[in-house]
Amino acid sequence: MLKDIEAAFRRGEIIPYLGPATASFATGAAPPSTPEALVSQLIASASVPHKIRNNLTAAAQYIENFKHRKTLSCLMTKAFTLDAAPGALHRWLASRPHLPLLVHAWYDDLPMKALSERESWGVVQGVSQAEHFGEWVHYFRADGARVPGKEFVRDGSGAKAPAEAPQETLGWATLLYEPLGAVAPAANYIVSDSDYVEVLTEIDIQTPIPETVQTIRTGRHFLFLGCRFTNQLERSFARQIMKRSSDRHWAVIDGELTRNEEKFLLEQNITRIDRPLADFVAELTALDAAPMATQAA
């Protein structure tokens, strides 16, 4: 199975989907790598009711309602602005000669840092309706500059519909898709209850998912690393992002699964790899240590 995955990477047929736990591979000051760790940092600077102290989205909503959205954004930025460098997993992924799409469903900037040595890449991030009303995503060049262009258009009825991707983004060899936003380059965060409600209201019809992502995922396999599917938010995002892709996927999940996780993996044709993530990453990265330039040749 491991060799099948590595071979699919060589062919450009795999889309890595990185969850919170992949932040633990950072070198230096590691950012929060679980929702529980993140919410504990948020409530250390802003008090919230006891009953929601362990609920990230609810705590974030409380801070947004009673302390202002700017306070929530500042606390998120503080939690992820660290002297952290990409680890072995991020560097290995960034060195793949054929990596059309990398999905990163957490708030750190480790994938961006790892991709910095590549040529021809850029970022598309989900943005909050609370801060960018009527817009679903923003595109950024590798240097962090935002790509100009409309984020929505009006259809025949006058309703808003997503605009086509800016032309220059279609030529990028690698697209980093961050559906929840990230600390860099512009501190965009989908994190509060209201943020998720806005996205989930439209995600079934794919409105918040960039057209470019929908095109690239067709026929490709997803490899879920550092992800769990214990709650509805995690499952909904993964299900909609991988929609209309191939019928074969993998997820590295160590330990006991919940009943909902078992059901989700079965319905999405995701083969579970029951191994500690660190062990799997060590074996995957050891399979191919050749530099990107050599492989590309």
Image: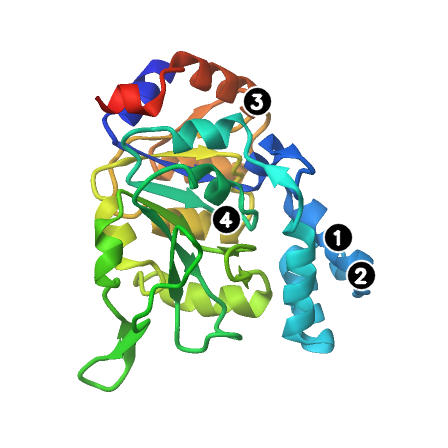
Q: CA distance from mark 3 to mark 1?
A: 25 Å
Instruction: Assign the C terminus to one quadrant of the image.
Output: top left
Q: Secondary structure at mark 2?
A: helix
Q: Label 4 amino acid?
A: Glu
Within 10 Å of disc 4 (Cα), the crowding (few <14, some 14-19, many 20+) is some
Instruction: Tell whether label 3 touches label 4 (CB within 8 Å).
Output: no
Instruction: Tell whether label 3 touches label 2 (CB within 8 Å).
Output: no
Q: CA distance from mark 2 to mark 3?
A: 32 Å
Q: Secondary structure at mark 4?
A: helix
* Residue at the disc numbered 1: 41
Instruction: Tell whether label 2 touches label 1 (CB within 8 Å).
Output: yes
Between marks 4 and 3 in the image, the one whose residue lies nearer the viewer: 3
* Residue at the disc numbered 4: 234
Within 10 Å of disc 2 (Cα), the crowding (few <14, some 14-19, many 20+) is few
* Residue at the disc numbered 2: 45
Q: Is residue 185 above or below residue 28?
A: below
Mark found first going from the N terminus, 3 or 1 = 1
Q: In percent of the image, x 63 and y 65: which residue is there?
A: 73
Q: In percent of the image, x 52 and y 25: which residue is there?
A: 88
Q: CA distance from mark 4 to mark 3?
A: 21 Å
User: Which sits in the foreground, 20 or 196?
Assistant: 20
Viewer can see residue 252: no
* Residue at the disc numbered 3: 278
Q: CA distance from mark 4 to mark 2?
A: 26 Å
